Image (tube, rainbow, N blue to C red):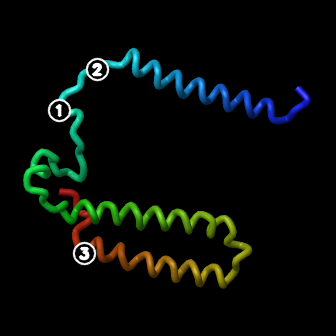
Amino acid sequence: MNNPYIPILIMAAVAVVVALGGLGASAILGPVNKNKVKSSNYECGVDPIYMESDMGRFPVKYYLVAMTFIIFDIEVVFLYPWAVTFGKLGLFGLAIMLTFIALITVPFIYEWRRGGLDWD
């Protein structure tokens, strides 16, 4: 084994075999109880059977939950690297991050006032 890439190729091959083996085993050994309810789509708390007939609108609550996810996801994506390099950035990094947090607070307050954080 003089080539340093052989262990990586072996590991990749084992990963592919395990992944395909798991998929194959679940297809062969898994229960097959298909019906209309299990096969139908379900999203945002609206039953799709009613959506097919009148094509109603999605509730605002769905979009508010999606906005919550985006707000916190973006915040974590930017806060983690900032926290890691906080000592190197100095006062400029602190000012930029305070500006970012102020800007990210605006949609959070909007969502809070619209009732997106109230779980009924």
Residue with the mark numbered 2? 32
Find numbered disc 1 in the image and state the secondary structure of the residue it sits on. Answer: helix
Does 99 sit above or below residue 84?
below
Q: Position of residue 67 (x, y in %)?
A: 34, 66
Residue at image x 69%, y 69%?
85
Q: Quadrant of the C terminus?
A: bottom left
Residue at image x 78%, y 30%?
7
Q: Is residue 56 left or right of residue 85?
A: left
- Disc number for residue 36: 1
How far separated are the C-alphas under marks 2 and 1?
Answer: 13 Å
Q: Is residue 102 left or right of residue 59?
A: right
- Tell which circle, 2 or 3, labels the residue nearer the N-terminal end: 2
Q: Position of residue 80 (x, y in %)?
A: 59, 63
Of tags 3 and 1, the one toward the viewer is 1
Crowd class of label 1 (few under 14; some 14 to 19; many from 20; radius 10 Å): few
Q: Name the amino acid type tagged 1.
A: Lys
Residue with the mark numbered 3? 113
Q: Quadrant of the N terminus?
A: top right
Residue at image x 30%, y 76%?
110
Give whichever of 94, 38 is nearer the camera.
38
Find numbered disc 3 in the image and state the secondary structure of the residue it sits on. Answer: helix
